[in-house]
Structures are given as C-alpha cells and as structure tokens.
Image (cartoon, rainbow, N blue to C red):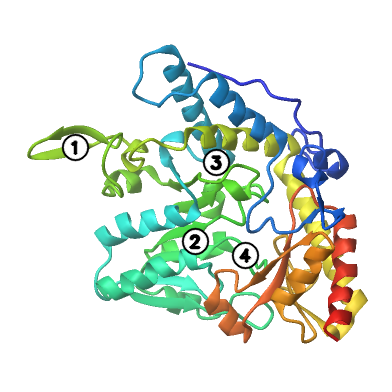
Amino acid sequence: MEVTHQGPASPVGAGASGGAGPLDVARVKKDFAILERPVHGKRLVYLDSAASSQKPSAVLDAMTRYYETTHANVHRGVYQIAEEATALYEQARAKMAAFIGGRPEELVFTKNATEAVNLVAYSWGRANLGPGDVVVTTEIEHHANFVPWLQLRQERGVELRFLRLQPDGLLDLSHLEQVLEGAKLLAVTAASNVLGTLPPVSDLAEAAHRAGALVLVDGAQYVPHAPTDVADLGADFLAFTGHKMLGPTGIGGLWGRRELLEAMPAFLTGGEMIRDVRLDGYTTNDIPWKFEAGTPPIAEAVGLAAAIDYLNALGMATVRAHEQALTAYAMEALVGRYGDDIVVHGPSLGRPRAGIVSFTYKHVHAHDMAQVLDQAGVCVRAGHHCAKPLMRCLGLSATARASFSVYNDEADVDVLVEAIGDAGRLFG
C-alpha cells in the first residue's frame, strides 16, 4: 500500500535535484518557524546543529497530519488506518535506506545513533568477541562510540587499540596496519563532533577489511551533511540519528550488511520481534523487525521521511558545499578578527572538515562564553561535547562549539564573531 501525506512545496536550492549550486538560505530560513522568535530581544542565531538540528515546517506538518488522520499501531491491525500507518512507517524505512545507499531490510530503526552502536556492541559484540579479541577505535570518538567498547573490555577482556590524534587535528595513520593487526572491529566516526575532522573512512575500511576486521561507522555528524553511500564508505555497519538531520528526536537507526544482521541475536525482546513464542522457547522475526521490539516510533519515522524529502530537495551535494563555504568563512572571520587571542581547534583552514568550529578565546571559559553569546541571541554548545578522551588529548576541559546547518548563513557568523568580542571585554 502506498500512502502519502501531501505537504508544502519542497524547498528550492540550486541543488533541488541534487546538482551543485548555491543554497537559497533566505528561503530555507522561512521554513524554520523557530528562527523567527527573538531571544533576549535579539534575532535567534542557532549554531548548535551538531547537538540537534531545528525542524522545518514540512517535518512538523507531516507528524501532525499523521496523528490527526492516520495514527494506529503498525504491523498488527488489518483495518484501514492501521494499514496506512504501517505503509508510512515502512516507506520511511525505504527512504532512509535509499538516502544512505542501502536496502530497506538492512535498516533497523532505533531511537538514536547511541542505541545503534550499542545494538552492535551488545548483539554482534557479545556473540563474537572474547578475551584478547581486538577492537580498534580513535581518540576523537563521541562517548557513544567509546563507552560500549570500554564496557566490553571490562566484561569480556576485549583489547582496545586507538588511532591517535595528531597536532594538526587529523588522525595519525602512520602505524595503521600495526594497529589493525588481528582486529575484529574498527569503530570510527565519519566526522568528529568536536573538531570537524573527517577521517578517510573508505581508506580505513579498506585497511580494516584486509586485516579481517569489520567496520562500524558513526555517521551521526556525517549523514545529515554530505552525500552518503555505505558501499563507498566501506561500512559493514552505519549508525545515524534523525534529530541531527532536520528530523524529530527519538528516532535513528543502524544499517548493517544483511548477512551480519541475520546472524546477530536479538538485542531487545518482547512484542513485534518474534515469529513465534512457546512455553519452551521462541523464534525471532525476519530482519529488520527482529531488532525492533515493541511499538516503534511511528510518527517520528513519518517526520524523518519528511526530513529526507527536504534534504533531497536541497541536494546533499549542495548542502555539503554550502556548509564547507560557511565553515571556511567562519574560520577566516574568527582568526582575522581575533588573531592569536582565539584558537580554532581541529584541521586548519583549507583542510576538509565538517561544519563544526570549536574554539577557545583568551582566558574566557567556554561556559562563560556561551552565556555571553546567548545574550546576543547566539546558541552555541559549551563543554566537553561527550568526548572526554579527546578533550584530555587537547589538554582542555571545555571548548565553545559553533556548528552549522542549511539554515545558517554569513550573517549568522557575523553575529557570532561580534559577540565573542563582548565576552572578551566583559571578562577582560
């Protein structure tokens, strides 16, 4: 059954059909009602999309229409609206799978990327890893792709090895083959949520596969911002989250190669994930439903599908080009204005990086910086960004982080740059 919820016209960027060209940010901004509200009497400048992106009206409207016209539980009811809800849910799965170059049966919905990584650790990890087995990760990982492996080290005696950070913000790959020797898994981010570093995932995956290891890619900061294809990445697993890609909270997912998912035991058990239950045992459902116990996030899947439509209308190549240009503009503006008083952490200008700029300014603590910026209507994140091993490597307790999305432009950066000076004067 094909069910569609007709929404407002798609946003128009020069990449409306996926081609290159400038993004019409002025028009995009109109789709995000929250950007019209004032904060402390100032225009809201939202620069915290790495934590969670804002939602266009198309996403909000799609979820409202679903609740007003279609809501019912999925995969169970035979009445019309239940069948419509099931169709919308599975259409969302197909759209998300296509968005990353996968197949619907390989796409498991979870509540976020953190749960997706934990699914791999608890299911595949506990079935395949024991004392002395090697998992390789990096110093730049988010805790979500770090703590599950620390837990396996504590529980199972798994050996953890690390690709280290260089002073230039890139990973040290000089001993890659040695680090990967005998490994069973490489768990690596596709984009650092602190530094914006873009590890060469496809090259790393090729080396890992030569060593006999599988590859788990944390795509939370990558999938929303760049064209993504799991085959090009060389991933065996890819985690993502909806709320960073203009979609709602409470939904994300894990893509995995079919043969791996089929061999993995169920992660959570209960309703929906079973084919049969008897007094003496049970059999599991087919993938991907084997990993989706209980009532799933149906409205959130509908919202995620609308977010995918929105991003596809802009064109992911256009999104990436826009955020690259805006990041370069921000780095030039910050250093040009404040010189040696400001340190922008991560790869230098001209090096590939995600749309993330973490900085420290003079002696102003990151939390103080964020509070002063808030008075100017500017939203940035301050803290360790759920990456304490990386912060210790940098010798820092916290940074302030500005992160960009499709609704940001140079005027937003200009407000940020000016407000940083206010913090310097206040704490000078």
Q: Which residue is mark 4?
A: 193
Q: Which comes sooner in the sequence, label 1 or label 4?
A: 4
Q: Which comes sooner in the sequence, label 2 or label 4?
A: 4
Secondary structure beneath label 3: loop
Secondary structure beneath label 4: loop
Q: Position of residue 61 (x, y in %)?
A: 66, 29
Going by the image, does 312 lie left or right of 16? Answer: left
Front position in the image: 196 or 409: 409
| C-beta proximity under 8 Å, tags 1 and 4 | no
Label 4 neighbour load within 10 Å: few <14, some 14-19, many 20+: many
Q: Which residue is mark 3?
A: 101
| C-beta proximity under 8 Å, tags 3 and 1 | no
Front position in the image: 197 or 27: 27
The residue positioned 50% from the left and 40% from the top of the image is 102
The residue positioned 90% from the left and 69% from the top of the image is 418
Q: Which residue is mark 2?
A: 205
**Mark closer to the observer (3, 4):** 4
Identify whether 42 is placed above or below 311.
below
Going by the image, does 263 lie left or right of 20? Answer: left
Q: Position of residue 324 (x, y in %)?
A: 78, 58
Q: Is residue 71 visible?
A: yes
Q: Position of residue 241 (x, y in %)?
A: 54, 49
Identify whether 80 is placed above or below 332.
above
Instruction: Tell me the quarter of the picture where residue 29 sits.
Output: top right
Q: Position of residue 16 (x, y in %)?
A: 77, 34
Q: Which residue is mark 1?
A: 283
Secondary structure beneath label 1: strand
Label 2 neighbour load within 10 Å: few <14, some 14-19, many 20+: many
Q: Which comes sooner in the sequence, label 3 or label 2?
A: 3
Q: CA distance from mark 2 to mark 4?
A: 20 Å
